[in-house]
Image: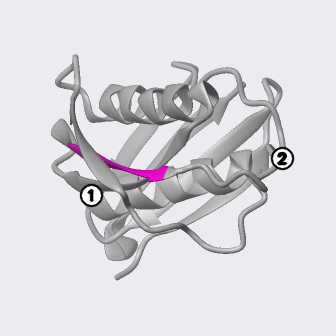
């Protein structure tokens, strides 16, 4: 099963929900959602380098917040964006791509918040993750 994501209106700003057949697929889908929430991009660019990432927590929903916060930090630096992830839910590598000069930031997202993060088994479809973007 390939992961998917969707956005829901939220009082803070935007709620990102992602699903996948496993936590890893749901994390990858959430990362794709964040990239496409930030930028007007036709398709995901190829990875140019991988950087190590490790969670500071042992709770899955908080690890997802930390991973997406790191991806947002990279995007806000301006030269690269995180477009892929490999590894487990608590340690792995973020795949970075050069940020193309023509990319326009579609919306300003300042933070991935700790406001009601969700990670749960969703029965037949696998895993569901949700975070709030501000």
C-alpha separation, residue under disc 2 versus residue under disc 1: 26 Å
Q: Please identify the dominant SS of the magenta region.
A: strand
Residue range in magenta is 93-97
- Give how far across and how far down residue 95 sits, in percent: 34, 52
Of tags 2 and 1, which is closer to the observer?
2
- Of 87 and 42, nearer the camera is 42
Q: Residue at x 73, y 30 (%)?
A: 109
Q: Would you identify the image quadrant in which residue 33 lies?
A: bottom right
- Of 124 and 119, nearer the camera is 119
Q: Residue at x 22, y 17 (%)?
A: 56
Residue 66 on the magenta span: no
What number is the disc on residue 72? Answer: none
- Give how far across and how far down residue 4 sits, in percent: 52, 69
Residue that badge 2 annotates:
106
Vertical side of 98 occupied by 42: above or below: below
Q: Residue at x 76, y 49 (%)?
A: 8
Vertical side of 15 occupied by 24: above or below: below
Q: Residue at x 66, y 60 (%)?
A: 6
Vertical side of 112 occupied by 28: above or below: below
Q: How many marks?
A: 2
Mark 2 surroundings within 10 Å by alpha-carbon count, few (fewer than 14), some (14 through 19), many (20 or more): few
Vertical side of 31 occupied by 76: above or below: above
- Give how far across and how far down residue 38 sits, in percent: 71, 45
Of labels 2 and 1, earlier in sequence is 1
In what element is the residue under mark 2? Answer: loop
Residue that badge 1 annotates:
24
Q: Would you identify the image quadrant in which residue 62 lies?
A: top left
């Amino acid at each position: 099963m390939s992961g998917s994501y969707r956005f829901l209106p939220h009082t803070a700003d935007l709620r990102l929900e992602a699903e996948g057949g496993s936590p890893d697929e749901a994390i990858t889908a959430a990362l794709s959602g964040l990239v496409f929430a930030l930028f007007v991009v036709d398709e995901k660019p190829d990875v140019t380098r991988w950087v190590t990432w490790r969670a500071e927590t042992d709770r899955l929903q908080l690890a997802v917040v930390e991973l997406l916060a790191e991806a947002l930090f990279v995007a806000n630096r301006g030269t690269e964006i995180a477009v892929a992830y490999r590894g487990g839910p608590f340690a792995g590598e973020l795949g970075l791509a050069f940020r193309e000069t023509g990319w326009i930031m579609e919306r300003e997202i300042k933070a991935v918040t700790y406001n009601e993060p969700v990670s749960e088994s969703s029965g037949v479809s696998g895993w569901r993750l949700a975070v709030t973007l501000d």
